[in-house]
Amino acid sequence: MYCEKCMELIKELERSGEDKLPHYNEELVRQTVVEMVQLYSANQEDVTRMTEGEEERVTSVQFRHACLERNKQCLLAYVYARLRRVGEMRWVLGSVLNTEVKQCMSEGELRWLAQYNRLLAKYMQSIGSGVDLTGSMEPPRSLYIAVRAMEDYGTIETDSGEVVEIKKDCQYLLLRSQVEHLIRLGVLKHIES
Amino acid sequence: MDAMNDGQVESSDNEDEETLTSQEVVSKLNETWLNEKFAPELLAPSSDIVDCVMQQIENLEENLELATKQGHISTKMPIHRMELERLRYILISYFRIRLAKIESNVWQILDEEPRRQRLMPNEKIFAEGFREALANALDSAALSKMPGSFSKLNPNTLINVGQPNLNSYVFVNVLEEQKGLAIPEPTRDNQDIVTLSAGSKHLLPYNCIRSQLSHGEVSLT
């Protein structure tokens, strides 16, 4: 049956959950495109036959056209939804994504991410110097927060010039604004008393 | 130290140069932020409030730095710092919400006149770049492989991508009394004509109070 492959692509995205990125399904995309090319050439043939007088082929032309539209719609929806998800990941994980995520992305998505990063950087600069829109994702409840390190991260420098070394299982009391992005990355864990 | 946050800030506004206290600026920022957060569509930007607040933030930061350098540590400092963090959060959240709305509805916002006017100049640059990047990515991943006329994007359908639902319900704070407001009945085609008294709160479809919101007669909460 036509359009099954493009539906598979959509179902794959649905099943993976809203914030996960499954591997780019190069194979299914290719198969959908091949189906589109086949439908289109069959239609072209039918249209030439119709101009020669075989009027009854009009229904199959319409049917194939509907399948072509459906294929296009699903394919575009797949690519677009993935691009938006990649963008959302950038907000959470930072401008450099780790290799695991990059492996799931296609080349076009990587290129798009680089462009998106540039656009964001330019926008943030235009607001004012040193404004980071990815900081302060939650309303601040307190100035300092107690965190525990989940892994060895190395040294970070705070605004006041202090150098703090992050070692696994050690607890620290740090300014919220300094460690927010580390909490998001999972390096530090907020200890709630 | 006392002059830190209680001073007067001039609204870099218009002809009559109104001077707002910093408290008024912050409450205006709050209102703008909440309106933008709960409205389904992109609202007109409040560049003057934004500029004011950015300046306040800068002043606060400078004063705090100066005070630490000079060794004037006082018990008020953590409070000022928290104030700074809170202001920063609201401002950044405001920008982020606008950016998210632009990203999800970029074709319609750039193509339709009233919406395009609501973009700040740097947002417009971002939106145009974003639209172009999207078109390139869609083209290279899918469109260029499609046969015949299917390889083009149809601008009429693009406008519908991410269209905001203008009938979604919002909680409304009535600031000025509204007489003769028409509210469509959800089940029939009739309209109810109601009067909303100042200071009351209601849950209404966004469409009903859209123009009142742009004139500041109601606010969202």
Image (cartoon, rainbow, N blue to C red):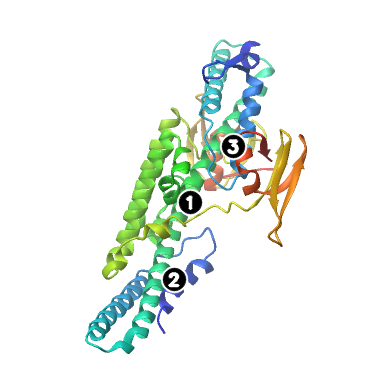
Q: For this view, does B192 lie left or right of residue A175?
A: right
Query: What separation in Å lies between label 1 and label 3 (alpha carbons)?
Result: 22 Å
Q: Splitting the image into 4 quarters, where does residue B70 fall?
A: top right
Question: Does residue B41 lie above or below A55 as drawn?
Answer: above
Q: Position of residue B114 (x, y in %)?
A: 47, 42
The amino acid type of the residue labelled 3 equals Ser
Please check whether the numbered discs 1 and 3 fall on a single chain.
yes
The amino acid type of the residue labelled 2 equals Leu
The amino acid type of the residue labelled 1 equals Ser
Disc 3 residue crowd, few under 14, some 14–19, many 20+, Cα 10 Å: few
Q: Nearer the viewer, mark 2 or mark 1?
A: 1
Q: Which mark is residue B104?
A: 1
The first of marks 1 and 3 along the sequence is 1
Query: What separation in Å lies between label 2 and label 1 (alpha carbons)?
Result: 21 Å
Question: Does residue A15 lie above or below A105 as drawn?
Answer: below
Q: Residue at x 28, y 64 (%)?
A: B144
Which of the chains bears the disc numbered 3? B
Which of the chains bears the disc numbered 2? A
Which of the chains bears the disc numbered 1? B
Quadrant containing the C terminus of chain B in the rendered view: top right
What secondary structure is marked by label 1?
Answer: helix
Residue placed under numbered mark 2 in the picture: A9
Residue placed under numbered mark 3 in the picture: B214
Q: Position of residue A143 (x, y in %)?
A: 64, 30
Q: For this view, does B34 lie left or right of residue A26?
A: right
Residue A100 visible in the snapshot: no
Please check whether the numbered discs 3 and 2 fall on a single chain.
no
Q: For this view, does A17 lie left or right of residue B168?
A: left
